[in-house]
Amino acid sequence: MSMMVNSYRFTPPAAGNTLEAEPGSFAVAGNAAAFKRALRMSAAPGAFVLGGNDAGLIPGVSMPAAAGTFALAGNDVSLRRSLKMPAAAGSLALTGKAATLSYSNASDAVVAYANFQLPSATGNFQITTGELGGRTPKMAVFCLSNAEVSETGHGASGEEGFHNFGATDGTNQWSVMSCTEFGTNSDNRGYVTTGCLYETNAQGTLMLAATFVSFDSDGVTINITTLHSELYSKRGFVIFFAGSDCHAEVGVIAGESDGTATKTIGFTPEGLLMSDAFMAATGLAGSTAIQTFGFALNDGSATQYDAGRYLASGTGEGRVNNKAAGYGANSIPTCTISFSGANVTATYSTATDVDLPYAAWSFGGRLTAKAGTITTPTSPGQVSASGLGITPVSALFLTGPGAVNTTIAGAGFGAGWLTASGGGSMGALSKTGYCSTTRLNISNGADLGEFEAFASGSLTVDFVTADATARLLPFIAFGT
């Protein structure tokens, strides 16, 4: 080997020899100090810094970033497009001029409503609404009466005045009915688990039968297998539960002789809609029209209400109760619903073996249901309910005949809905049916309530028509 002092050059003894640098820190200095192109400098896992005007990584070198926190700094710092940075569950922040995070965490939970009118022929019948936004429902609840023309009561000689409530989740279905013949004291009631719409006349002759076919984009299809001409053009509405965050189940809490029965649902329900005809089994009971429609919420408030009617002779009577089911008069008990996880318990006020058909839902907290009440004014005007804790987007109402837990002679009951874009209702008063395709029709036009406003924590209904009777209207508001 030779060393030239003046030029400060190191010459290896033979071509191909290398100068190895052991791991650690080192410096190469001099006017022409350089690494040959073929030399490599590997960086072991750990933390390191590249510095200098031309500090860089050769394109072929990879620098993995282990799980944890790290920072990239510098004028031209960037991550290559093919690099991936997984973000575990928790909170994280991206900062910088072009920092972005592409991720969708939007809620997909909807309660929608659609008015409908029965056709004049059997076969498949579809009910749809654009309010579903193209979603396919997971549950539908049907509300039907013997009304034909919006806000005009219907009661023709020989025809039946009736209430009909039904439900389906695509697997299970039920329908609960009561009827009374106009011009007679012939009455009937019953329920089935083989269809979602079912109605007989007072003598037990089948007048309407329909079964679930399919849930469709924006609606539901049912197959009407029986349709008597007396029921052509009868009106009602459907409540749809939909969205990827929606869980729904339709079933029956089978009654027990001691008056307490528990059903385990496939999820922890946030609420239930229910209808009963004071029956221990499917079929017909005859002689008396008895029916309720109610709700219970699993929000810690134990809030529950139902509205119903009883008609054995004359013009009958109606009630609204602060219980989930049961008429509550004429030796018919009321029913309280309690929740424990997925277990739902129905407890009657006296020992009785009564089945309770239900429609349960949960939105996983994405859409919240809150219950409240308003009382109709005794002259036209607006009525508000506040303290709901949500901003409603829709509301389902029970339209009872008077004060809570009070029997009103000659009365009936109904149900209705309001959103910012529409409304609808149905009901029966004694032997006369009534409805509306735009707003709440209460007691055959005695009160007419229209949507006025949904606001943070409140809703307001404008009663453009009101009589001298103050009627309690329990409701469920859905919102966020």
Image (cartoon, rainbow, N blue to C red):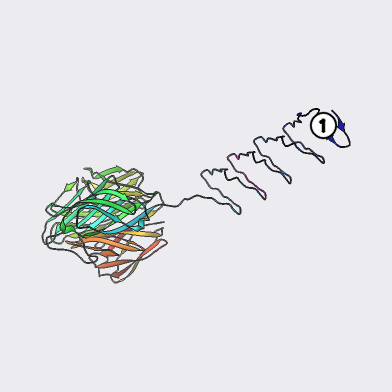
Residue 190 locus on image (x, y percent): 18, 50
Is residue 6 visible in the rendered structure shown here? yes
Which quadrant holds the C terminus? bottom left
User: Residue 437's image quarter?
Assistant: bottom left
Residue 54 locus on image (x, y percent): 72, 45
Residue at 26% x, 59% y is: 116
Residue at 28% x, 67% y is: 448
- What's the residue type where badge 1 is placed? Thr
Q: Which residues are magenta?
A: 64-75
Which quadrant holds the N terminus? top right
- Mark 1 = which residue? 11
Queried whether the magenta region covers residue 47, the answer comes back as: no
Q: Is residue 444 left or right of residue 35?
A: left
Q: Residue furthest right?
A: 6
Residue 364 locus on image (x, y percent): 40, 49
Residue 446 locus on image (x, y percent): 24, 68
Is residue 161 visible in the rendered structure shown here? no
Q: In the rendered view, tell whether residue 261 sits above or below residue 289.
A: above
Front residue of this view, candidates 137 and 293: 137
User: Residue 83's image quarter?
Assistant: top right
Q: Main secondary structure of the magenta part?
A: loop
Queried whether the magenta region covers residue 68, the answer comes back as: yes
User: Residue 87's image quarter?
Assistant: top right
Residue at 42% x, 61% y is: 456
Tell me the SS state at disc 1.
Answer: loop
Q: Is residue 479 left or right of residue 414?
A: right
Front residue of this view, candidates 182 and 27: 27
